[in-house]
Amino acid sequence: MNAVIRTENLVKRFGHVTALDHLNLEVAQGETHGFLGPNGAGKSTTIRVLLGMLRSDEGRAELFGADPWKDAAELHRRLAYVPGDVALWPGLTGGETIDLLGRLRGGIDKRKRDELLERFDLDPRKKGRSYSKGNRQKVALVAAFAADVDLLLLDEPTSGLDPLMGAVFNECVREASAQGRTVLLSSHIMSEVEALCERVSIIRKGVIAETGTLADMRHFSRSRLRATLKNPVRGLGDHDGVHDLKTDGLDIDCNVDAAALDDVLAQLAVAGVAALTCEPPSLEQIFMRFYGDELAASGVQEENGK
Amino acid sequence: MSTAAAEIEDGLGTLAGTGKLLRFQARRTRVFLIGWFAGLAGGTWMIAAAFPGLYPTAADRAQYATTVDTPAMRSMTGPVEYIEAYADSTAAMLAHNMLLWTGALTAVMFALLVTRVTRADEETSRLEVIRSLPVGRRADLAAAMLLAVIASLVLGLLLALTVLGVPGADLEGALLYGLAHAAIGIVFAALTAVAAQIAGFGSTATGMAFGVIGLAALMSGVGSAQESGAIWASPIGWSQETFVFTAGQRWWPLAVSAGAAALLAWLAFSLVTRRDFGQGMMPARAGRAHAGGGLRSVGSLTLRLNRAVLWSGVVTMLLLGAAYGSVVGSADDMLETLSDTQRQVLDQGGASIEQNFAATISALDGLFASIFGLLVVGRARREETGGRGELLAAGPVPRSGWPGSYLPTALATVTLAVAVGGLFLAITGSASTGDGAFFGELLGASLLQLPAAWALTAFAFAAYAWLPRAGWLRWLAWVYAFVVSYFGQLLDMPAWSRALSPFDHLARYPAEDVEWLPVVLLTLVAGVFAVLGYAGARRRDLHFS
């Protein structure tokens, strides 16, 4: 596998706070990789280390096989970045900002720029100070998607966009991916990641808690199973792989580990099934599982499968 | 009926919540306030404590009075009325030397304070949170003005206590001295409040206020030098016109300050409800859809972002140079009226009085032009903390381009400001003396200051690169050079401590011959700081919010 991004035991401290604690992240060429985690988990810090804005304290980071700190300017020719909170120059218009960022890269495809302005419905004649948060975000997105680059680093890029623009964004990411570009999409909007990303890394407290394809993650997770039976079934609750069982007469509702599905279905078949639904877990549910203890600590019940 | 509704019935609706906001703003600015109080009162105290020892007798003070009684020195201190009281009162001598500068600093303090709690909050949408609470539309401005008035009076009281021990200072005089500062604070707070309504955003408001402060200092200087009414055009001048600690001490000029402050405050309060939240009075225009041909590199962007600083530097130095140049000629007229002793003091080393004047003035040209270089360097930090630099740092731009391009931009700004100041000093100076040869001498004397100005600018850049959070460090060298230039002789500072100011090493051309070694060495020092700065910029983390 040809890795565009690779970090090994990456550590970054700010004073006595450890923002990244031996982080291992790998993104292969051409893939759209979801980077999930709550606020403060270290997503932006990771991306800024990869951009050579922050120097790591320990471990290694590689971008296209080179050192992102030492070769920052050279490497940046091959990537475009959209920060989570875009700050624009108050006196420059959106159009000027997009052109400037393009020219720094050695020129901008005018046709593509104008097409993107149209798709994102952005007025390029407004000054930076008068754009709303969503429109500032659009300026950075147009500049990034118009650039002819190999890698897109997107740090919560849709946080200020309305759903309509969110759809345009998804389309643009798919097109970039179809053109063979690698995308690292940091987000906490699950539907977006689920719709776009082949592989996902979940970060928590500066460490990658889980990484893999969505299919893999689903496989290792619980499905929600609901059924209406013909006869009562006994002993289902004793099964190790069955969780949160609720019975209401002949209706049952529970979460089942992927490994236990065979057994459970066999048991149900014996009782006789009138109706059955079995849903794979959503990414949100997978995500919640990794943060279950934190949620519990802040008083929220673990809601896996609800 | 709720209290808020009751207040609206009383016509106080737009001021509802002022008291709570006042407490909140006071809490948020307490470090700022304490720092400025300590700086202004502490600085005054140090100089006040040194004065009696330096000039113990009436004869000492009278002798110093002769050196100060020239147009050039008066333009940097104050009206002649104080000089006549030197022998009788150490306090009058202190007030004469201090009021213009501590007054100008007080104005800076209150301009910063008011922008901080009004416009800057509005920009960052902190104020949006507050306006959504049950508070009136004018409440934040009212709280800001109240805070400024209270802070001014506290500062005045502190300064009064500080000077109370100086020989020649009675209680009334000390109170007047303190309130003279408070008056400047209140006037500039009100003025900044108006600027905050007109300007499109906070930094423009600060810039407008600083421009007026510069103009006020200039008009005070011109008025004192020419002994003309020009000083009445300056809010700082009104405080100087109290002639505090002299026999002619008077209170009524502070009534002018009070009237002006009331008028400005009224204007600010009527403007605040007339504009939309987050917008200035100046309407936004549609800009260009495409970048012009000039905007194609980080360097050109940096230059464009600092255009306002560059132009304000050029205009300020132009005015300063022209104003000082126009009084060179009157130095000559004055010479005829001087006594032999005075002539002796002034004719140092056989140079003419104009040449001495030219040397003093051109050193100030370099010192003041440096301010604009330092402002450019400070802008680099704001681009960083404001997050705007992030888009550049993520582009194919090495650190030497961003934030590196701020150093050449700062140096260019300083160079242009020194040159323009020198040029207009030379034009008006040679015209007022009617001596064409003086043109070259004045211009040369100003340009000679460049290496020292470069050294200060490069120092500020190195400080930014290595210790970006310590904004005060960027100004440390400049403030020190300022103290040496203005108070070095007055305070009889030892030679080694004066030598820490870069300007101290340059020859007093045209009163002395040019020495090239210090010029070369100072340029080298600037180069070393530049290299250090670039090394620091390469090795540190960038702090985007």
Image (cartoon, rainbow, N blue to C red):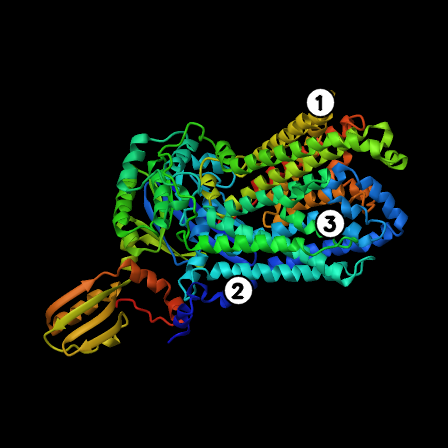
Q: Chain of mark 1?
A: B
Would you say the residues marked 1 and 2 are in contact, meaning their CB atoms lie under 8 Å apart?
no
The residue to which callout 2 is attached is: B22
Q: Earlier in the sequence, mark 1 or mark 3?
A: 3
**Dividing the picture into quarters, in which one does residue B138 lie?**
bottom left
Using the numbered discs, state the Cα–Cα distance from disc 1 to disc 3 in whole angstroms. 33 Å
Residue A161 % position (x, y):
31, 50
Residue lying at 75% horizontally and 35% vertically, measured from the top left: B360
| Numbered circle sitting on residue B98 | 3
The residue to which callout 1 is attached is: B440
Both labels 1 and 2 in a single chain: yes
Would you say the residues marked 1 and 3 are in contact, meaning their CB atoms lie under 8 Å apart?
no
Q: Chain of mark 2?
A: B
Lateral position of residue B370 relative to residue B291, left or right: right
Q: Earlier in the sequence, mark 2 or mark 3?
A: 2
Q: Earlier in the sequence, mark 1 or mark 2?
A: 2
Q: Chain of mark 3?
A: B
Would you say the residues marked 2 and 3 are in contact, meaning their CB atoms lie under 8 Å apart?
no
Both labels 1 and 3 in a single chain: yes
At label 3, the amino acid type is: Met
Lateral position of residue A106 relative to residue B236, left or right: left
